[in-house]
Amino acid sequence: MSRAFDRLPLQSRLRWAAAACLGAAWLATMLLWWVLGMPRMGTGGALLALLLGGVWLALRHLERRALAPLAELAGEAASREAALLPVPPTADEVAVIARGFNALVERLHEAQRHEREHLDRLEEAVRQRTQALRVAVDEAQAASQAKSRFLASLSHEVRTPMNGVLGMAQLLSATALDATQRNYLDLMQRSGSGLLGLLDELLDFSRLEGHAIELAAQPVALRSLLDEVAAAVYPLAVERGLLFEGHLSPDLPQRVQGDTSRLRQVCLNLLTNAIKFTQVGQVRLAVRRDEARGLVLIEVSDTGQGIPPEMRSRIFTPFVQLDDSLARRQGGVGLGLSIVDTLVRAMHGSTFRVCLPLAVLADAAPQPSRSLRVAMISDAPGGQQALRDRLLFLGHDCVAALTWRELSFAPEALSAAKPEAVLYDEPPTGWPAGGTGVFATERAPWISVLVHRSAPLPGLSGPRRVVRPLSDAALQRALDGPEAQAADAGALPEAAAAAPTRGPLLLVEDNEINQVVARSFLEHLGFEVDVSGDASGAFGALRERDYALILMDCQMPGMDGYETTQRIRAGEVGEWAQRTPIVALTAHASPDDRRRCLDAGMNDYLAKPVNVQSLAATLERWLLAERV
């Protein structure tokens, strides 16, 4: 009951108290009246009755003058929502309470005013900071876009002349040169390639920094890609006097789903960084499959000086190099590992050991013409295991793995294994020149595993050889025999194999040097070429002659290659040209540039500087497609 009373409004409680007082006085009067009784009431009774009546009147007066106004005051306070109350024109308690209430309300109003002013100041500060942040973000985005435009422009301006330099160097390499001239030419080509590599790193970092990375989901020939990467970095390792070893696990799938170019970039950056900072010893690439977790594990190890624990957190920081003196000797700007880290994280992988969740695509393992019994002779235990795993993957059986020392002490071990082929690498220093002749009487062909492209070791019969770094395809060709083994890669591919054409080609290029380079490449490949320096000349040529394919430069004075292609596709120069394959030749090398070319109606894309191998492969792809 008391809790219910406490929950009532003040006005109701005051009125209830007043009513209770009046009721109590009335009950007391009636009780005394009944006890004394009217017949016996004398003077004392009359006085008592008068006294009780006076009490009742006093309580009634209290109810009217004090409790009722207090109840009314409480009602006013409840209805005005913190507004000031009217003060009665009296000096009683009700007026005092009203004045006290009004003072409290005024203090509340003042506190609310200060609070509103504080909130207004906070909102203004937040608005100003938000505006400042918006301006800063806009400025940062503008600066990033300006930087990207600058780097793209720089790429174009560098690639255009480098296309002429490296193209002419490649043409020159096909001519008769003495050893000194070829060495100079090799240095020139490596310097140009190094400059382009540095430029590509800057462009990649700019795109990754701006979160413009896009990963393709396409079938990747993983083993072939890793063989290509090993072949690309192997000359650098040999030049530095390092042993390079590539070990692909036999259970490594042939094909996975991923981004070919990004996977290649990750592996190249890891390996070139390891080779660059290893003074002596070896660099090892090991790739295996973790089937339980659905991962492909890529491990690069080296015998370099290592990284101090306190410095390891910095190795993926852009433009940071841990040893400035060593960096000055080796070159680079400190972006290789940063790019690797960004790409691996984008592919949901992890570093320091690169673990990538690549989906395995169904594909049959390579089936050799027949399974061979193969023996190997090598003093490199790691090399033996890598070669054994390749043979196992290719479907061959490794029946013996000997060192040169073991072979010298027990030559019968080789005969007892009855090999159908023998793989051997360079014997140790001091091995007699004719000391291997006795083993050459074996019926099995001897296949030399060479560090350099040179003749097989003296004293061993047979023309077969395979050059490090090993690849599945090259090893299988060597095992299949001289007929299946392709000739060593020269400076330029043969014309007969690269020109499945049904008509002439049109080259649209405004730069005279690049005209000479591209035309020389195409003529070497056996094509007839017409050259035009701008869009109007191209339109005239297309109206006069039907071409098998058009090579289109994208940046030309006047009408650029994009608009030229769009007008060709619109049929402005005839139906034949409208259907003719168009391949972009451009110094712009970003994925956005490739997309822009395809959106304009071009069929394919080659970034400058163009080498003759990639040009031949592209022409073969489109011209064979046309024939089919």
Image: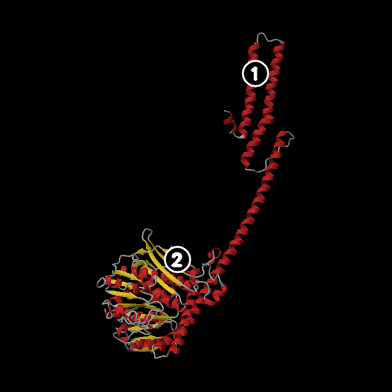
Depth check: 384 or 408 in front? 408
Task: Please name whichever residue, 239 or 576, is drawn nearer the observer in this view of the structure.
Answer: 239
In this view, 544 is above or below 588: below
Q: x%, y% of residue 57?
A: 69, 23
- Disc 2 is placed on an element classified as helix
Give the colour scheme of this rendering. secondary structure
Give the Cα distance between marks 1 and 2.
Answer: 96 Å
Q: Which residue is mark 2?
A: 344
| Apparent side of residue 447 relative to residue 314 in the rendered image (left or right) | left
Q: Amino acid at mark 2?
A: Val
Q: Quadrant of residue 217?
A: bottom left
Residue reaching furthest top? 40
Q: Which mark is residue 28?
A: 1
Q: Is residue 20 above or below residue 178?
A: above
Residue name at image x 36 percent, y 86 percent: 522
**Labels 1 and 2: the sequence-earlier one:** 1
